[in-house]
Amino acid sequence: MARERAAVQAIAAGCDVALVCGTDHALHARVLEAIIYAAEQETLSPARLEDARRRQRRAKERFLAGSAPHPLSGAALERALGTPEHVAVAEAMTAWA
């Protein structure tokens, strides 16, 4: 229950999102349910939630403005694969798997 409570308290304190890492889908669901319950009980005020939603919307509009990012393909993909940067990222990702 500590992570669920921490997520609610973080949002109440001004965080706009709660990042729940890991593969425990039940934990993700419990945290989301705790946030929903806090909103329903108005432990998290509607104004606070609306502020967070507005900031998230602005961030999405700012960083996703214009065309959506496109993954590399064709010749551009071939040039990127196997580069030192690509290998470093792949190795770092493997370390976390």
Image (spheres, grey):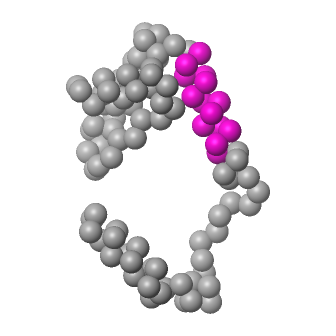
Image location (x, y in percent) of residue 12: 45, 20
The residue lying at 33 percent from left, 70 percent from top is: 92
The residue lying at 33 percent from left, 46 percent from top is: 21
Q: Quadrant of the C terminus?
A: bottom left
Q: Is residue 27 magenta?
A: no
Up the image or down, 39 lies above or below 28; here it is above
Picture quarter containing residue 54?
top right
Say whether residue 14 is visible: yes
68 to the left or right of 49: right
Image location (x, y in percent) of residue 7: 36, 29
Up the image or down, 68 lies above or below 19; here it is below
24 to the left or right of 52: left
Image location (x, y in percent) of residue 20: 35, 41
Picture quarter containing residue 4?
top left
Q: Residue furthest right?
A: 66
Image location (x, y in percent) of residue 50: 60, 22
Q: Is residue 58 magenta?
A: yes
Up the image or down, 66 lies above or below 7; here it is below
Picture quarter containing residue 82?
bottom left
The residue lying at 27 percent from left, 38 percent from top is: 26
Q: Residue furthest left?
A: 1
What secondary structure prevails in the magenta region? helix
9 to the left or right of 3: right
Q: Quadrant of the N terminus?
A: top left
Which of the pair 29/67 is nearer the observer? 67
Say whether residue 33 is visible: no
The residue lying at 55 percent from left, 19 percent from top is: 48
Which of the pair 2/70 is nearer the observer? 2
Residues drawn in magenta? 47-60
